[in-house]
Image (cartoon, rainbow, N blue to C red):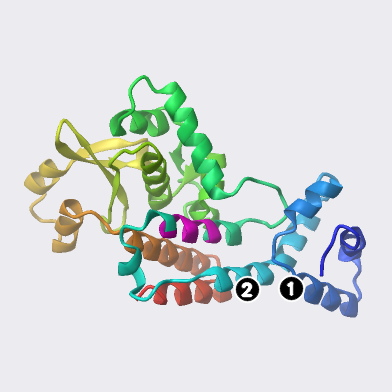
């Protein structure tokens, strides 16, 4: 069991090249929760760690984080359909994904607290609380942007990282928009457009699609259907029907599976594939 008492000793052993020592470290960290950020903060250890030591320590903690993720991943009977409009369950599962993707070393607030903070800030700064004003505040302002340079970075699906860095992929940015909107009692839903997830809001009673990845640009749903008659049936359905929360969660997992495959991390890809299959 890792404690504040033995953690400094374990960290000193990171540079030990002896195979038996490294194996012992793997076993020790594998029996943790995968997150030692509170212990690190209490001892102020993270301050002095070299970047390579932080990376190694995070790798040692990764198996334990995977175990914690699997233990906490509890999908109700019915799979994705059972959480189609359950915001609490949806956010809970996004939180434990974020906890897994975190390094397990640096201290940060949990996902619900980060969403609360952003929602409170928006409430204080917006002259009028509506979905379009929130869109402008979050995206037109440049506060949140598409991570074009590192599109396949798994952290793009870590909503805590997205909230802190201001960068994300289409689905994580749209989901953060939805979660903050939910805190403010605003109607913001998901649009499962093939290949590029969007959000949906209403302005003067008309449905508008929000491309959160590209600074929140607006696309009128009726205009897309009228001007692009060649689009697929799946795209037409996505434009007209809100995406259930359970399916958004499933798409998060498939994005992560794809990202891990792109980065040659097959074991993590299998993990996310397994979690996605639990939603069937």
Q: Nearer the viewer, residue 240 or 16?
A: 240
Residue drawn 79% across the image and 47% down it: 41
Element carrying mark 1 = helix
Q: Earlier in the sequence, mark 1 or mark 2?
A: 1
Q: What stretch is highlighted in magenta?
A: 89-96
Disc 1 packing (10 Å; few <14; some 14–19; many ≥20):
many
Above or below, 229 relative to 18: above
> At which x and y percent is residue 100?
59, 62
Q: Is residue 173 left or right of residue 38?
A: left
State yes or no: residue 86 in magenta: no
In the rendering, at what x and y percent does residue 45 appear? Answer: 84, 49
Tell me, yes or no, if residue 93 can be seen here.
yes
Crowd tier of the residue under label 2, counting other residues whose Cα lies within 10 Å: few below 14, some 14–19, many 20 or above: some
Circle 2 sits on which residue? 67
Side of 16 relative to 269 (left or right)? right
Q: Contact (CB < 8 A) between labels 1 and 2? A: yes
The secondary structure type at the circle numbered 2 is: helix
Q: How far apart are marks 1 and 2 (CA)?
A: 9 Å
In which image quadrant can residue 125 be found? top left
Residue at the spot x=59%, y=49% of the render? 110
Give residue 7's quadrant in the image: bottom right
Mark linked to residue 30:
1
- The answer to whether residue 260 is left or right of residue 21 is left
Residue 10 - label: none
Location of residue 245 in the rendering, given as x and y in whole percent from the top left corner: 34, 58
């Amino acid at each position: 069991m890792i404690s504040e008492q033995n953690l400094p000793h374990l960290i000193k052993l990171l540079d030990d090249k002896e195979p038996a020592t490294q194996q012992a470290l793997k076993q020790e960290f594998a029996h943790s929760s995968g997150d030692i950020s509170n212990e690190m903060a209490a001892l102020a250890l993270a301050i002095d760690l070299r970047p390579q030591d932080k990376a190694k320590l995070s790798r040692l903690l990764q198996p334990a984080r995977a175990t914690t993720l699997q233990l906490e991943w509890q999908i109700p009977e019915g799979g994705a359909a059972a959480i189609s409009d359950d915001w609490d369950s949806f956010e809970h599962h996004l939180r434990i994904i974020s906890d897994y993707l975190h390094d397990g070393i640096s201290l940060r607030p949990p996902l619900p607290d980060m969403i609360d903070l952003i929602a409170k800030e928006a409430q204080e700064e917006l002259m009028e609380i509506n979905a379009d004003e929130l869109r402008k505040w979050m995206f037109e302002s440049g506060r949140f942007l598409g991570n074009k340079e590192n599109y396949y970075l798994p952290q793009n699906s870590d909503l805590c990282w997205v909230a802190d860095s201001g960068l994300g992929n289409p689905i994580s940015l749209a989901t953060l928009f939805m979660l903050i909107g939910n805190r403010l009692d605003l109607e913001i839903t998901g649009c499962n457009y093939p290949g590029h997830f969007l959000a949906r809001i209403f302005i003067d009673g008309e449905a508008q699609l929000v491309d959160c990845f590209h600074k929140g640009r607006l696309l009128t749903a009726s205009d897309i259907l009228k001007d692009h008659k060649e689009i697929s049936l799946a795209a037409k359905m996505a434009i007209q029907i809100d995406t259930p929360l359970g399916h958004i969660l499933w798409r998060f997992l498939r994005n992560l599976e794809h990202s891990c495959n792109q980065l040659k991390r097959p074991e993590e890809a299998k993990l996310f594939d397994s979690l996605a299959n639990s939603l069937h």
